[in-house]
Image (cartoon, rainbow, N blue to C red):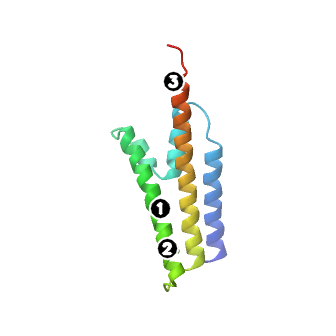
């Protein structure tokens, strides 16, 4: 993997992090922005999908990313030919960023729920 490719991936990771940090607005806006970062952009745009389906697809996507990273790390530790350290580190970073995005979505939902529960009747 060349340094140009590594720089490109790092810039993508930084862009995702800035999107996560820059999320603001109402209750609906953060969900869509963070969902795009988590890799469920197409599911969010489709009005036929229910909220539960979108959330499940996002969690499944993050789970697959983490499983792929873990599998790659295990293969690297076992010395499987063709598995290089930069490749493993890249997958681990992808898994980390997607997990942080899902955590941010969860935090926003909890915050919105608490805000709704504190509203006077």
Badge 3 or badge 2: first in the primary sequence: 2
Residue for point 51% across, 24% down: 116
Q: Nearer the viewer, residue 95 or 5?
A: 95
Residue 45 in picture, x, y percent from top left: 42, 42
Badge 1 is on which residue?
Answer: 65
Q: Secondary structure at mark 1?
A: helix
Task: From the image, state whether disc 3 or disc 2 is nearer to you.
Answer: 3
Measured from the top left, where is residue 72 in percent x and y? 49, 73
Q: CA distance from mark 3 to mark 2?
A: 43 Å
Decide if residue 25 is on the left or right side of residue 51.
right
Query: Disc 2 marks which residue?
Result: 72
Q: Residue at x 66, y 68 (%)?
A: 7
Which image quadrant: the N terminus? bottom right
Q: Is residue 8 placed above or below 121 in the rendered structure?
A: below
Coordinates of residue 108 in the picture (x, y in percent): 55, 37
Q: Is residue 18 visible?
A: yes
Direction from residue 18 to residue 79 in the image, left or right: left
Q: Which quadrant would residue 30 be assigned to in this image? A: top right
Q: Residues within 10 Å of mark 3 (few under 14, many from 20)?
A: few
Rendered location of residue 55, percent (x, y): 42, 44
Residue visible at 50% across and 82% down? 78
Q: Which of disc 3 and disc 1 is earlier in sequence?
A: 1
Res. 107 image quadrant: top right
Nearest to N terminus: mark 1 or mark 2? 1
Task: For marks 1 and 3, give the CA distance.
Answer: 34 Å
Q: Residues within 10 Å of mark 1 (few under 14, many from 20)?
A: many
For the residues labelled 1 and 2, the Cα–Cα distance comes to 11 Å
In the displayed structure, would residue 119 be above or below residue 70?
A: above
Tag of residue 73: none
* Secondary structure of the residue carrying numbered label 3: helix
Disc 3 marks which residue? 117
């Amino acid at each position: 993997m060349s340094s140009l490719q590594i720089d490109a991936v790092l810039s993508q990771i930084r862009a995702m992090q800035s999107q996560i940090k820059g999320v603001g607005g109402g209750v609906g806006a953060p969900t869509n922005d963070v969902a795009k970062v988590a890799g469920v952009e197409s599911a969010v745009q489709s009005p036929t999908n229910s909220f539960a389906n979108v959330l499940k697809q996002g969690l499944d996507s993050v789970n697959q990313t983490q499983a792929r990273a873990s599998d790659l790390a295990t293969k690297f530790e076992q010395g499987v030919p063709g598995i290089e350290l930069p490749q493993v580190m890249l997958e681990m970073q992808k898994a980390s960023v997607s997990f942080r995005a899902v955590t941010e979505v969860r935090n926003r939902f909890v915050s919105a729920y608490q805000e709704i529960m504190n509203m006077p009747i």
